[in-house]
Every structure is written in structure tokens, then in C-alpha cells.
Amino acid sequence: MHGRDDTIHPSVWAQPAARSQGDVSSDEDNALVATVLAGDVSAFDILYDRYAERVYRIIRGVLSDRDLARDVTQEVFLQAYKALPRFRRTARFGTWLYRIAINRAIDAGRSHGRLRWSSLPATEDGRFGMDEDTVQGRSARVDADDVEKTLASLTPMYRQILVLRYTEEMTIAEIAETLGCSNAAAKVRLHRARLKFKEIHERTVAAADAD
């Protein structure tokens, strides 16, 4: 794990996840955890290599600060390594790790005075849809820089759920598991985040067109 900082390149932020959370076998992860706990710490390097880029993307989604996100990523793996004896193998290792990542990112943002929180009241109409092409940057007028600038304007709560859904391609159930909330709450948060993203992005595009 030590000296692996250079493996987390900032460009991964704009890339979709190479594989979904379910693509990595929980049994395989659990076997690696057991190997680490048995004394073979090199097995943790395999877990690090498997999850480091994704953890970095999630953290950067909360912090929107590359240098800080890189530092916090290293702290997450150190914390996870120390906490391995308390890991319940009935849970997914990845989900457990992502929760650590989000909590560490929030703590780091607070200590640097960078977090702004807003409430997420439940929707009355139950609709959670939006034009996903806009969110995912497939419209003709959207590029990676536009998406990143819009994300940077959102609160950490909104950023993290959009990152989990669109960069990491998690399902609602996976997002709920990672954030420790119900599926319904995850849908509400995602809906609010989509609306806010669309509002800010359309305002940004309109301003650019006016120039």
C-alpha cells in the first residue's frame, strides 16, 4: 500500500467505472481479508489495487479537490487496514470501504471548511426522473469540463450521489447500501441532485451562449 499514491491519477474522475460493484466477488474479497488477518499483508495490496481508483473518484466527488482527495484516499486505506479485524464478512468489502471513504471525505471537508449541507425533503409527486443524457454529458453542448464545473458547484451531498450513480454506475440499491439509507431515500436524494445539476448546468450553458 505504501508508495501507491501515484497509481491514483486525477484523470480517472472523468472516466466511467470499469466494472460495477457486483463484478468483484465478495467471496474473493473476503478470502483476501482473511489472508491479511492471517498475517500476509501483501494481500491488502491486491485490495488496494482493486479499489483505489474507485475510492478516489468517490472522495473527489465529495471534496472536488484533487490533492485533498488523493491524501484522503490514502487515509481511507490506512483506516480500513486497521479496522479489518472488525469487518463483518457478511457485508460487501467494497460497500464497507466506500462508507469509510465517504465519512473520511466529509470529515476532511469539514476540517477544511469546505462542506455546505442542504436538506433533502421527500418529494410529493414520487417522480425521480430527468433527462439522463444531460447529467451524463451526452448532449452536444456538454463536455467533461462543463460536467466537472457543474459538479463542483453542487453541495457534497448532491455530488456524492451523482458520482455513485453516473461515474460509478451503481444501482439505487447499491447506492442505498453504500450511504446507509433506504432505497426510497436514495431515490429522493438522486432526484434532488439531478434537478440541481440541471438547474446549474442550464444556467451555465445559457451564460456561455450569451457571450
Image (spheres, rainbow, N blue to C red):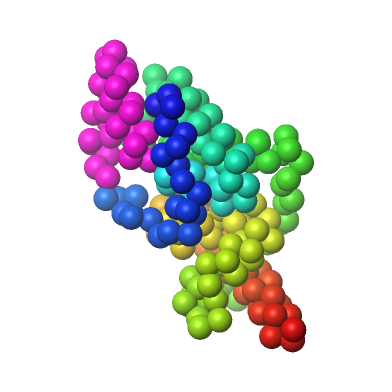
Q: Nearer the viewer, residue 183 or 151?
A: 151
Image coordinates of residue 188 in percent, x first then y, are: 57, 63
**Hey, which quadrant is residue 209 in on the image?**
bottom right
Locate the N terminus by quadrant.
Answer: top left
Image coordinates of residue 38 in percent, x first then y, are: 27, 14
Residue 205 in view of the camera: yes
Q: Nearer the viewer, residue 184 or 205?
A: 205
**Hey, which quadrant is residue 148 in on the image?**
bottom right
Locate the C terminus by quadrant.
Answer: bottom right
Residue 91 in view of the camera: no
| Image point (33%, 33%), residue name | 47
Is 202 situated left or right of 85 in this image? right
Q: Which residues are magenta?
A: 24-51
Q: Is-magenta flag for residue 33?
A: yes
Residue located farthest toward the top when viewing the structure as drawn? 39
| Image point (38%, 40%), residue name | 51
| Relative to 9, residue 28 above or below | above
| Image point (76%, 41%), residue name | 113
Is 208 situated left or right of 7 in this image? right
| Relative to 31, residue 175 above or below | below
Image coordinates of residue 173 in percent, x first then y, are: 41, 55
- The number of numbered badges drawn on the structure is 0
Q: Is-magenta flag for residue 202?
A: no
